[in-house]
Amino acid sequence: SQLHLNPTRSGSGGSVSQSCCGYLVSLIFGCFLSLLQLTGVLDDCFCDVESIDVFNNFKLYPRIKKLTEKDYFRYYRVNLKRPCPFWPDDGHCAIKDCHVEPCPESKIPVGIKSGNYNKYSQAANTVSDMTECEQAKELGAINSTLSNQSKQAFADWARHDDAQDNFCELDDETSPDSEYVDLLLNPERFTGYKGPSAWRVWNSIYEENCFKPRSVYRPLNPLAPSRGESGKINNRLCLEKRVFYRLISGLHTSINIHLCAEYLLDEGWGRSVWGPNVQEFRQRFDTAETKGEGTRRLKNLYFLYLIELRALYKVAPYFERAFINLYTGNSQEDGATKDLLLQVFNEIRAFPMHFDEKSMFAGHKIEAKTLKEEFRLHFKNISRIMDCVGCSKCRLWGKLQTQGLGTALKILFSEREIQNLPEHSPSKGFQLTRQEIVALLNGFSRLSTSIHQLHHFRLLLKDNR
């Protein structure tokens, strides 16, 4: 960015313009080659990158994008005011693009507001004999008009949630600090939030809460060259710990791709221009810039995609039951949302190369149970670290994507409970809150978007070359 090309100035070796352009082209071409190397079978599973690209970009991405634009999935209830539990709060980001605009209660569909504690069906959201207009006035952050039947159902769910192997520290939806956020009006973008505050979050995740050999060094600044972060990690960790590390790396990669794809390119006269930043992308993923680590980071994104794809495959029977209705109060909208969700499941079911999670925690029962609990607690701690993110918009999307992954892990470890679900009635053996459902589908949508954006970056790099 500091090079100023002037074709009128030249020396004996040729023009400055030619030499500088040649240098820039070689850098861009190097990044393009690293993306071309992103091929073949992924480690720890029998699936190749090319198959995922075709499946995601042409079959699943258009449907999952449309699904997350539906009312049921666009409104997410979150507490962005929880204090950081690990170090003194160093203040929130003052950049205007870090701000999250909460959604007024009047804009939230009545069925969603009345279902703070409930899940999906119209019956479960019956509150009283009040008219819809009266409900709209009375229903606030805390629903005080629940019927006895709904209160009993809430008590059952609460007991179940206490006993469930949750992988995330869930926000208390009844807290006065919890607010609805319209995800479509608060898109994930590069807000300008960076530096020590942001680096400390990722440093804490990798150094204190992520399984990896002690010899693997993760720099405080994630953009700085790494020392020794090499393929040795795959040889020194058991499958379960390798998977955990790759999940966190894949999540980090996905978030970075979003920030590169929606970068603030220009800000003037009250109009901000957002778009792909190839230089920023190269800095994070180019083989030369990352000491060969960029390709591995991108492969971990694909690996995470397969894990969450497998969770959706496993949980499909939960949603396919006839009485399940993603309830917002608009019957026509709800029917269309359910139909679209079933289309997504049909596409996922047709994918031939799913991750086989049965190989995880399959050893000695006591050792497997101990390792699973360690796995769960590490991830739960990471979900708590998201409350330390200083940028509100980054915190919002970090919490949502972490909860989405945590919900996916909860599903993968609840296969028996899902298989035993009754066909025509709710089950206390396995339940998902609306918050978990919204996080699960939006979190996977972010991964799907990342892979779609990778294709766009390939085209940009090819054109620049």
Image: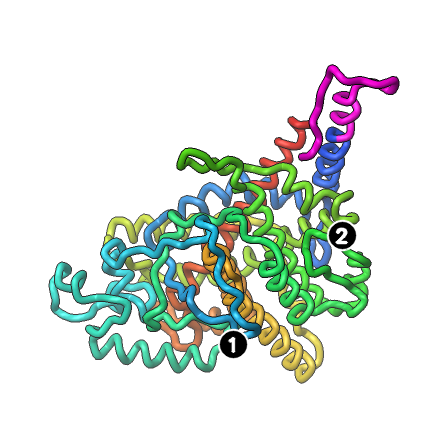
Q: In the rendered image, which residue does mark 1 sit on?
A: 165
Quarter where residue 5 is shown: top right
Q: Earlier in the sequence, mark 1 or mark 2?
A: 1
Percent x, y of residue 273: 47, 36
Q: In the rendered image, which residue does mark 2 sit on?
A: 225
Amino acid type assigned to the residue bearing label 1 in the image: Asp
* Along the line of sight, the residue nearer the viewer: 428 or 387: 387
At horizontal 59% and vertical 46% (from top left) the residue drawn is 257
Percent x, y of residue 362: 67, 74
* Along the line of sight, the residue nearer the viewer: 296 or 23: 23
At horizontal 73% and vertical 67% (from top left) the residue drawn is 212
Residue segment shown in magenta: 1-23
Classify residue 114 as left or right of residue 295. left
Q: Secondary structure at mark 2?
A: loop
Amino acid type assigned to the residue bearing label 2 in the image: Pro
Mark 1 vs mark 2, foreground winner is 2
Image quarter (top left, top right, bottom left or bottom right) of the C terminus: top right
| Residue 192 painted magenta | no
**For the view shown, which residue lies furthest in the right direction?**
12
Q: Is residue 380 above or below residue 463?
A: below
Q: Is residue 184 above or below residue 131?
A: above
10 Å neighbourhood of mark 1: few (<14), some, or many (≥20)?
some
Image quarter (top left, top right, bottom left or bottom right) of the N terminus: top right
* Along the line of sight, the residue nearer the viewer: 379 or 269: 269
**For the view shown, which residue lies furthest in the front direction?**
9
User: Which scheme is used to colour this image of the protein?
Assistant: rainbow
Q: Is residue 288 above or below residue 173?
A: above
Classify residue 463 as left or right of residue 446. right
Q: Is residue 28 above or below residue 184?
A: above
Visible residue check, residue 414: no
Quarter where residue 13 is shown: top right
* Along the line of sight, the residue nearer the viewer: 462 or 158: 462
